[in-house]
Image (spheres, rainbow, N blue to C red):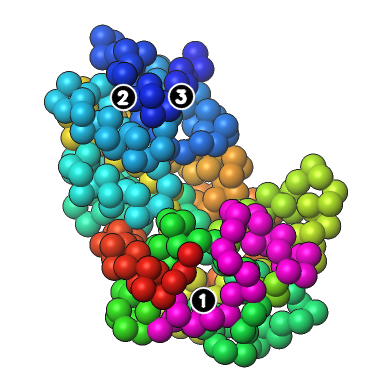
Amino acid sequence: MPARRLAAPLAMLAAGFAGIGTASAEEVNIYSARHYDSDQALYDAFTEKTGIEVNVLEGSSDQLIERIKREGAASPADVMMTVDAGRLWRAEQEGVFQSIESPVLDERVPAAMRHPENKWFGFSQRVRAIFYDPNDIDPANLKSYEDLADPRFKGEICIRSSNNIYNQSLLASLIAHHGKEEAEAWAQGVVDNMARDPEGGDTDQILGVASGECNIAVANHYYYARLLESDDPEERAAAEKVQVLFPNQDGRGAHVNIGGAGAVRNAPHHENATRFLEFLASDEAQALFVEGNHEYPVVKGAAKDPVLDSLGDFKTDDLNVSALGENNPEAIRIFDRVGWR
């Protein structure tokens, strides 16, 4: 049976909703801030494998966190799924998650991709990459995130706004590696090098390079993969004008974030929640993350994808992703101070 997927707009959350219940032991209730139609394949595969029905309530991370807090011990939520370690950290700080003891998860999910106390786990990887116009940019001069602040690139960069969690986590990683002062100097340098005020999403930054609005963009890798596979010939042509660069290959490696999940503190179906999380680390589920959204698997060798393979091999930063959440408040303060809109 396909998972029941239930939207959760703010008004619905405020009014309460009885569409997810706790009556059956053979179900698991997922509160998800992942808005990918392809995730339905994950739920269907889990049900087929285990016989456990999946109920899904969708909303933004903040909406779902507030709902779980309001529901308290009576919450039907078993698992919360979202994207970016920064959002998982926010949920953790609000007491949403419980620690999970699972030899399967300990073995399958790398230590850098999970909370130190196993309160949440990363199940897919998203790389913050640099994209450039090969006609105007020599990649020999652009090898790292730090290079984005080099004055030689003044007026060259397209990048999203500072309220974007992906950029907040990138800056949080720089705080972890360099400290607050150097990270703030970097942020100021990027602001000085912007080709325009931040606007749009990650795809818009890549298209900005293709159109000549800027020569350098920062975006998550899968937005580029989508363009390469687009049904729109113009989008494919735009992607082919742009080259991708995975930064810091001579040092710590490219910044990686996650799509992840954790068991909710008062999960009424604790065993089913654990089984669902363990399933997300299986080769089958890892392949579905790759096929559905071109995210990299966290389990090495679990899945292959022709589009991702075409981007080549690269080294990733082994910083524990929990640091991205811990440094998020300071990253936001830095963004505000340097005027990153």
| Residue position for label 3 | 7
Horizontal side of 296 relative to 274 (left or right) equals: right
**Residue 90 image point, x, y percent:** 28, 49
Magenta stretch containing residue 179, yes or no?
A: no
Q: Residue at x 28, y 30 (%)?
A: 67
Badge 2 or badge 1: first in the primary sequence = 2
**Residue 245 appearing in the image:** no
**Residue at the extreme left of the image, as rendered:** 73
Q: Looking at this view, name the residue that lies furthest to the top.
A: 23
The residue that appears at 63% across and 69% down in the rendered structure is 196
Q: Position of residue 274 (x, y in %)?
A: 28, 33
Question: Residue, x 84% and y 52% (percent of image)?
Answer: 234
**Amino acid carrying mark 1 in the image:** Val
Residue drawn at x 66%, y 57% as measured from the top left = 204
Label 3's element? strand
Disc 2/disc 1 C-alpha distance (Å) = 38 Å
**Is residue 39 visible in this depiction of the protein?**
yes
Residue named by callout 1? 191
Dot 2 surroundings within 10 Å: few (below 14), some, or many (20 or more)? few
Q: Is residue 192 shown in magenta?
A: yes
> Quick check: 14 left or right of 152?
left
The nearer-to-camera label among 2 and 3 is: 2
Residue type at tag 2: Ala
In the rendered image, which residue does mark 2 sit on? 14
**Residue situated in front as seen by the camera: 47 or 227:** 227
Dominant secondary structure, magenta: helix
The image quarter containing residue 16 is: top left
Q: Give the residues in magenta.
A: 185-213
Q: Earlier in the sequence, mark 2 or mark 3?
A: 3
| Mark 2 in CB contact with mark 3 (< 8 angstroms) | no
Q: Which element carries disc 2, helix, strand or loop?
A: helix
